[in-house]
């Protein structure tokens, strides 16, 4: 897949605003992967960064937009919010995973998800998401299946 507006990893660092982006990023990663350990939370961080790099309006063009885009991350759905408010220790653990994920992605060129922009946890859904039908995951990390060929 070609993304004409793809930004480089070094340009990505200029799109991160600490006050506006980091809190939604940590909360999204916590809510999406709190049971997946550090590697699972780092992988979700990489998916968010992959979406930012691809600069697709439908996903958002900065971290906050990507995290808060309607119906993209289940943590922000109304029925999920009350169930997943992190305690301060959990917030710090998710923050550590996020910062490790940011560092390895931007400075080391590591993407645990092989460019994935989508994922889901088969144990948490009743049926496969429509975008995953007929596609093979590019990576499986803990309970999440990751996909890099979703338009």
Image: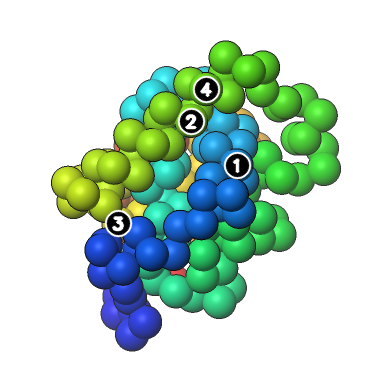
Residue at image position (25%, 63%) is 10
Circle 1 residue: 23
Vertical side of 105 occupied by 134: above or below: below
Residue at mark 2 to residue at mark 4: CA–CA distance: 5 Å
Q: Give the number of the mark in front: 3 or 1.
A: 1
**Cβ–Cβ under 8 Å for marks 2 and 4:** yes
Alpha carbon of mark 2 to alpha carbon of mark 1: how far? 9 Å
Residue 105, image x and y in percent? 27, 48
Percent of width and height locating residue 51: 44, 62
Q: How far across and how far down the image is residue 35, in percent?
A: 52, 21
Secondary structure category for the residue under label 3: loop
Which residue carries the number 4 mark? Answer: 92
Sequence-earlier tag: 1 or 4 = 1
Task: Give the CA separation, mark 1 to mark 4.
Answer: 11 Å
Left or right, 74 with reference to 46:
right
Asked whether residue 92 appears in the rendered view, the answer is yes
Q: Quadrant of the N terminus?
A: bottom left
Q: Residues within 10 Å of mark 1 (few under 14, many from 20)?
A: some
Q: Quick one: label 2 or label 1, which is nearer the N terminus?
A: 1
At 67% from the left and 17% from the top, the residue drawn is 87
- Is any part of residue 117 visible from this angle? no
Where is mark 3, residue-wise? 115
Q: Secondary structure at mark 1?
A: helix
């Amino acid at each position: 897949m070609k993304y004409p507006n793809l930004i480089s990893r070094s340009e990505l660092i200029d799109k991160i605003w600490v006050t506006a982006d980091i809190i939604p990023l940590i909360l999204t990663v916590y809510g999406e992967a709190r049971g997946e350990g550090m590697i699972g939370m780092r992988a979700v961080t990489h998916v968010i960064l992959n979406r930012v790099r691809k600069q697709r309006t439908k996903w958002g063009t900065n971290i906050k937009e990507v995290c808060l885009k309607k119906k993209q991350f289940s943590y922000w759905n109304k029925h999920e919010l009350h169930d997943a408010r992190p305690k301060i220790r959990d917030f710090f653990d998710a923050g550590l995973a996020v910062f490790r994920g940011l560092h390895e992605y931007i400075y080391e060129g590591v993407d645990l998800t092989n460019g994935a922009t989508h994922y889901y946890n088969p144990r948490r859904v009743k049926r496969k998401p429509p975008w995953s039908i007929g596609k093979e995951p590019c990576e499986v990390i803990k309970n999440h299946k990751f996909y890099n060929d979703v338009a």
